[in-house]
Image (tube, rainbow, N blue to C red):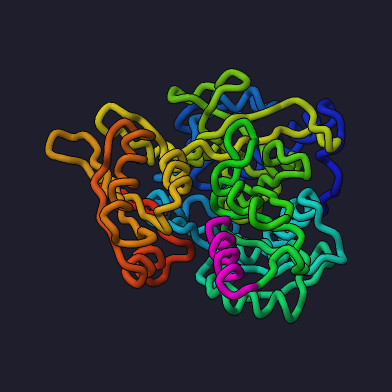
Amino acid sequence: MIFQPGTAFESHQTIAKLQQKKLKELIIYLHNHSVYYRDLFSKENINIKSIRSVGDLKSIPPTEKEHLQTQNDRFLCVPKSRIIEYTSTSGTLGSPVTIALTENDLQRLAYNEYCSFTCAGGVPDDIYQLMLTLDRQFMAGMAYYSGIRKLGAGLIRVGPGVPSLQWETIIRLKPTAIVAVPSFILKLIQYAKDHSIDINTSSVKKAVCIGENIRNTDFSLNVLGKKITEAWNIDLYSTYASTEMQTAFTECHEGKGGHLNPELLVVELLDEDNQPVENGKPGEVTVTTLGVEGMPLLRYKTGDICIAHHEPCSCGRNTLRLSPVIGRKKQMIKFKGTTLFAPALFEILNGMEEIKDYIVEVSANEIGTDEVLLYVLPINTEEATDHKIRAYLQAKLRVTPHIKYLDAPTMQKMLFPEMMRKPVKFIDKRGASTKT
């Protein structure tokens, strides 16, 4: 399959025509090869010839994550002999989902990340240090690796964690960029401070941030982003992606939202009734994959709540841009009259100097409302620190959640349980086990 770089710079009309053409091809492909979607079209009496544009998609019921979990094989569109890579989700919103890829899908994935790294200022002269796992069926690690290779830049595969090893490698091999979780970048900064490493004279000039927000919905840096840039004079580029969509949204140098690769994905933002939201309003990111061969998806609801921006970007791209993730639909917390999403609570906790690390656990009480327990690693065990933390939370939340203080080894074990690819910051005990 051949992809043409630069599609995002085309006019809105050209992009719309391209998506319309690819959408028609996808509908025919699904009808011919997908058991799940062929049955859906039949059940809903959908004439596939009537789906001629993105606007026509509203006649098709969205695909939910539960459909992928319980009917995974029915989404497969090729013989298993053509599958050369099996990946899976991290299980953030329940049990993991398997996504199978063909050789063409891997090429598409590499192209996607090539576009993403180019969008984030990447050039062939760069050297990227990957501070993440490339094993455990993790699509993202493989995607970053493939995209950087396609870019022609250098690669250093260090893996997650271990600040001492990361810094030893930075000093020795002099990468120009890192790919890392933002909260881990703070640990790199702290390690450098503790060991008298002048980070601002290091070779690293930019960071591609994965897995966590570094901006507010108005695109200003949030607490996490500010902490990084106040200590380290590097450019930050935020990303958003999911295994199921096999595509990423990445910021350009303007930092005004993640750019869509329109040749790879159709995006809708839907409300609770599966209707498109008004421009500027938050909605659930719902995607239709273009060019996927193994397990293409039609109107797949990601569970992530974002805001779409449609005006052209000053970087020259004319594509839709997505805001940082406001929250995940299944992670809404209703606590003593206060409603918030997990990222908002993370932002509050990140702003507290007395808290070195944390995990949020939510459970349901006997009357069906949410209870919040914070596992906290404080800077010390002094009574004054406890008072400051509780007063801060009371001021920010208007209510004080339960707090359980942990020591560093216990917190480390909870944050990184065996076989988890990312640190666990959120534990949902209100039903099915949910960790993120």
Camera sees residue 191? yes
Locate residue 44 relative to residue 54 in the image: left or right.
left
Locate residue 162 relative to residue 378 in the image: left or right.
right
When the figure is inspected, residue 412 is found, relative to residue 4, above or below; the finding is below
Residue drawn at point x = 76 percent, y = 44 percent: 252
What segment carries the magenta color? 182-196
Residue drawn at point x = 69 percent, y = 66 percent: 199
Q: Check residue 430 for magenta coloring.
A: no
Residue drawn at point x = 65 percent, y = 53 percent: 293
**Hey, which residue is sitting farthest top in the picture?**
278
Q: Taken as a whole, is the magenta stretch helix, strand or loop?
A: helix
How far across and how far down the image is residue 335, in percent?
28, 34
Looking at the picture, tell me which residue is in the foreground, 96 or 424.
424
Looking at the picture, tell me which residue is in the foreground, 327 or 271.
327
Camera sees residue 49? no
Looking at the picture, tell me which residue is in the foreground, 80 or 254.
254
Where does the N terminus fall, quadrant-wise?
bottom right
How far across and how far down the image is residue 304, in percent?
50, 39
Query: Would you identify the image quadrant in which residue 80 lies?
Result: bottom right
How far across and how far down the image is residue 159, in percent?
59, 73
